[in-house]
Image: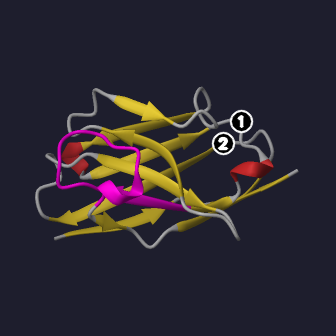
């Protein structure tokens, strides 16, 4: 079992930056691929970014590519999402997720553990 706790959300203005963190506890963290998803009101949960177990491979949705960066620090059992040049359409609850696999994955169905989410609101 893996427990995930997100932090770092908040209210910012368009163009600002935020860094989300997801602290993992429980089973060995180093062998888990991780992902970030988000869900805006009235919309389905959508993929944002994923990273493989070692942190050497990453993949992003087109909507955040070039603005967001996912990273993984296995020694601290933490995965990060650096969000730059934020836009109002980035407003959502952001969820961290972990897989019982080492390979990254972009579909929510491929994840076994989820955090409770952290709210990110970007004002125009």
Which residue does the image show at 47% across and 61% down from the upper left?
Answer: 95
Q: Residues within 10 Å of mark 2 (few under 14, many from 20)?
A: some
Label 1, residues with CA under 10 Å away: few <14, some 14-19, many ≥20: some
Q: Is residue 55 left or right of residue 81?
A: left
Gap in angstroms between the C-alphas marked 1 and 2: 6 Å
Residue at numbered disc 2 = 17
Frontmost residue, 44 versus 29? 44
- Residue at image x 38%, y 49%? 35
Q: Quadrant of the N terminus?
A: bottom left
In primary-sequence order, the first of circles 1 and 2 is: 2
Q: Are marks 1 and 2 in contact (CB under 8 Å)?
A: yes
- Relative to 24, say whether 75 is above or below: above
User: Is 83 displayed left or right of 85 in the figure?
Assistant: left
Indicate yes or no whether the magenta region holds residue 116.
no
Q: Which residues are magenta?
A: 94-111
Residue drawn 69% across the image and 50% down it: 90
Drawn side of residue 78 relative to residue 14, left or right: left
Pointer 1: what residue?
Answer: 85
1 or 2: mark nearer the eye: 1
Residue 89 lies, with reference to residue 26, above or below; the image says: above
Identify which residue, 89 or 84, lies in the foreground.
89
Residue 98 inside the magenta-drawn segment: yes
């Amino acid at each position: 079992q893996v427990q995930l706790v997100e932090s770092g959300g908040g209210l910012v203005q368009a163009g600002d930056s935020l860094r989300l963190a997801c602290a993992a506890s429980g089973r060995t963290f180093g062998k888990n691929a991780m992902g970030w998803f988000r869900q805006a009101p009235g919309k389905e949960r959508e993929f944002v970014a994923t990273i493989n177990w070692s942190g050497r491979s990453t993949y992003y949705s087109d909507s955040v590519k070039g603005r967001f960066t996912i990273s993984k620090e296995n020694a601290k059992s933490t995965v990060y999402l650096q969000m730059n040049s934020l836009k109002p359409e980035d407003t959502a609850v952001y969820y961290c997720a972990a897989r019982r696999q080492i390979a990254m994955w972009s579909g929510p169905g491929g994840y076994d553990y989820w955090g409770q989410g952290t709210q990110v609101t970007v004002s125009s």
